[in-house]
Amino acid sequence: MICFLLYLAALGLLGGTAATNQIFTSSGEMDITSCPITYYGQKYDKVYVAFESNTFSLCFNGSYQTGIKNDCIFMSGGTADRGGLSVFTKEIPAGSGVHRLLPNLSNAGKCINIIPLKDSQQSEIQQVELGNFGSQAILAIRTHSGYTNLDVEADAQVDGVSVFKQTYQPAETNVGVITDVSGCRLAGVVYKTNTTVSDPTTCTSVMCDFSGVATVVNDCGPMEQCQGDGSCVFKTMCTVTGSAVINIVGRVESVPDRCGYTLVGPSVIPGFKVLGVFQERRRKDVSFLERVILQLDSPNVQISLEQGGRVQLDEKVLKVNGSAQVVHGVELSRDHRGVTAQLSKSQYTVHVLFDGNTALIHMTGPSETAVQGLCGNSNRPLVQEKADEHSAPGCGMGYAEAADSNINCNSTTDWCNLLKEAPFSACNEHIDPEPYMAACTHTLCKYPAVDGLKCQFLEAYVKACSLHSNVTVERWTTKTSCPAVPRASCQDRFCSDNEFCGERQVGDPRCLCRAIFASKYKSANAYGEPTECTKKSASVTLANCLLEDKSIDYAFLHLNDEACKAEMDELTHMLTFKFNSSNTCGTVVMANNSQIIYKNIIMRRNLSDSGMINRQSPVHIDFSCYYAQPEIKSLAIRLKQRAVMQEMTSGEWKYNLTMKAYSDAERNNVIQLDTDIQLDQNIWVEIETEGLDEKVVVVVMDSCWATDQPSPSGALRYDLITNGCANPADQTVKVEGNGLGTSNLFSFNSFQFTGSSADVYLHCKLELCVTQSNACAPICSQGARRRRSSFAKYEDKNPALITMAWSN
């Protein structure tokens, strides 16, 4: 029971001016625009009053209805059933008696709403007063001496919930209740002005200031997490994905080059650092995290986590699987998510998960500690975090490339902003999505959305939420069409330093060339280094990743001799083809006036997807060495026979077959046994028949080829004529009159097999064809070579084979 000070101050002592009265009976809507009331943080300019069952209600959000949430003041009404409203305007200065009675009242009073309650005889039973003190307000209730109820109850409610309730007995005249109805609202909870309420389960405190504004204060530091009992422990997360480092306070740092940087310094665990090495991929101007290095001072070792789930201890590759193993105090394991490394020391733990693209670095401990490196919250310049010992020379050189016209940055931004929508929003209160959205947009607006990059940033956010806050984002892959079971990129695929593991097609991981490495070859339209020629050997080195870029599988490549294949360097993935004097690999030796040419070709074995089609593009890479021509005489070769003659029988025809070589196109000078022939000299070979009637039958030269053995099926073979046409790979071969008569003529430049002093044997296969409108002659064109048709009427069942040889 208290003295009614607001009423005395406003009327008895201050002499305020009253505005026009508003009258109501039973119920009514009252306009208080001239003296609005801020009731527990919510400002109102109308009140709704009503009498029901001896109870008076004054509500702010419409008339009172049972079961409907409202802001209301209830009190026992006695016999009153009507009333009115008067507004008194008079400042009540700070420090007045009212302020002394209500110490949380800090603002000066501006006006008072006076609501007298009367009975049918116009006798005043009670009076309700609402005082405007700016952002604060007070409630006063006065009971007159004629009120006979023994108990008077006042109940102030917010959203239907009591926030102030008092019962008193009116034993004296002019007594009642006065209270502060100021406060704050937050998430459906009301807080009194100038109070702080703590919640140990969340380690947060809500502070309600004098102006009615509620502020939530986290009792744990930015790197701590609540334990649910009011205590906090050190627990923080750093995410590194692409070129972005999202540090422990949510700030994004973008690494612009291809150097190594300290991610976590030794402040968390003395003598232990986590470093990241960045390199370019498809573009020179965008870098990506390529490996994570755990560096220990004692002992002085480093553990490298790399793409493909590979782990190295210094230079030694470790076999890591699902069973945890401890290496120098670091616990290592590997599963479908990637490689996990964890070190615990001095009650602090650093946990690293690396899937080949994204590193999640989780740190815990008993109390907050400083974190150094790019993951920390310092403002040190990027250059000060550079790790020189893990930075290649020239790694800081900048590159500028033209923007990718296929990238729509608006669509990319919409995609990255999915992190604010369901189902990702389930994690938003635990981990701020904004840094991840910024990193996503920054990268995908410059770099094509390949190699799973579109889903990489979303997956990084989901993994961070799970690891740091144990919150699972449900069905996010369904909404985004990302892989339902995210796996570590390129598991068990090792790529060299000049390569990265990417996808040539979706779901087809390969080792692809890094942009800077590939640029020097692509500008020269080459697949690798120039041919290296020595006195007795030659080799050429190709980059396998350049072949992969053209869908060429090196395993199916060979030289002229199919047995000669490439050797791969397991460390660099460079391929080497070579031949020497001991193994010529089908190399052909030719000469011109000034050079000797050792010619070979890198080609692909013909593979067809079925019996009819072939989807493999052809491969034809010249592999030649050019040497200065020594004294001509030392290169002379000689025929072993002046002419070769054979008697042949083919079905009903018996005929003689003669092969002769000439040194001139007019065939005036037959090459004799003592005639010296120079390498790369033009030779004309004529094959004649005797005993055939060219009106009935003609001779078709089907093929001619050279071997290093008398047998026509020797392993080392060089084709001059195939399917009746000159070999398109040898521009010196010319064929004349094939299938037009009973004799044939062809020419070629002489040659010797590389590294061999053995004889060269020229074999020619001939067939007879019955003439019919000249249908026996092969059709040869620049782009393709084919036979016109099958032999007319008669197919030669006994083709002729004739051989001529020459030697050094």
Image (tube, rainbow, N blue to C red):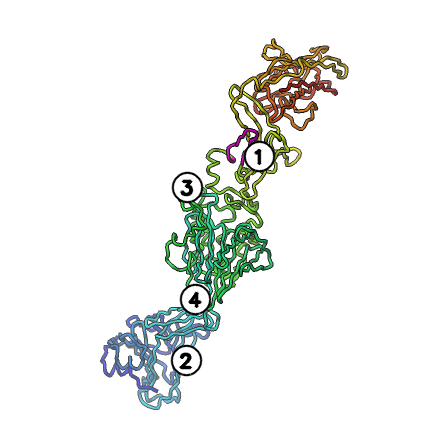
Q: Residue furthest right?
A: 652
Q: Residues within 10 Å of mark 2 (few under 14, many from 20)?
A: few
Q: Which numbered marker is on residue 368? A: 4
Question: 246 and 484: which one is in front?
Answer: 246
Cα distance in 3D space between marks 3 and 2: 79 Å
Identity of the amino acid at label 3? Glu
Q: Nearer the viewer, mark 3 or mark 1?
A: 1
Q: Secondary structure at mark 4?
A: loop
Q: Is residue 120 visible?
A: no
Q: Residues within 10 Å of mark 4 (few under 14, many from 20)?
A: some
Identity of the amino acid at label 4? Glu
Identity of the amino acid at label 2? Glu
Identity of the amino acid at label 1? Phe
Locate residue 439 relative to residue 576 in the image: left or right.
left
Locate residue 284 relative to residue 649 in the image: left or right.
left
Cα distance in 3D space between marks 2 and 4: 59 Å
The residue pinned by badge 2 equals: 52
The residue pinned by badge 1 equals: 577
For residue 92, which quarter of the picture?
bottom left
- Screen quadrant of the N terminus: bottom left
Cα distance in 3D space between marks 3 and 1: 34 Å
Question: Which numbered disc, 3 or 4, marks the residue that appears first in the sequence?
Answer: 4
Percent of width and height locating residue 187: 42, 69
Percent of width and height locating residue 158: 40, 74
The residue pinned by badge 3 equals: 401
Q: Nearer the viewer, mark 2 or mark 1?
A: 1
Q: Which numbered marker is on residue 527? A: none
For residue 610, which quarter of the picture?
top right
Cα distance in 3D space between marks 3 and 4: 43 Å
Asked if 365 appears above or below 598 in the picture, the reply is below
For residue 107, which quarter of the picture?
bottom left
Question: Which numbered disc, 2 or 4, marks the residue that appears first in the sequence?
Answer: 2
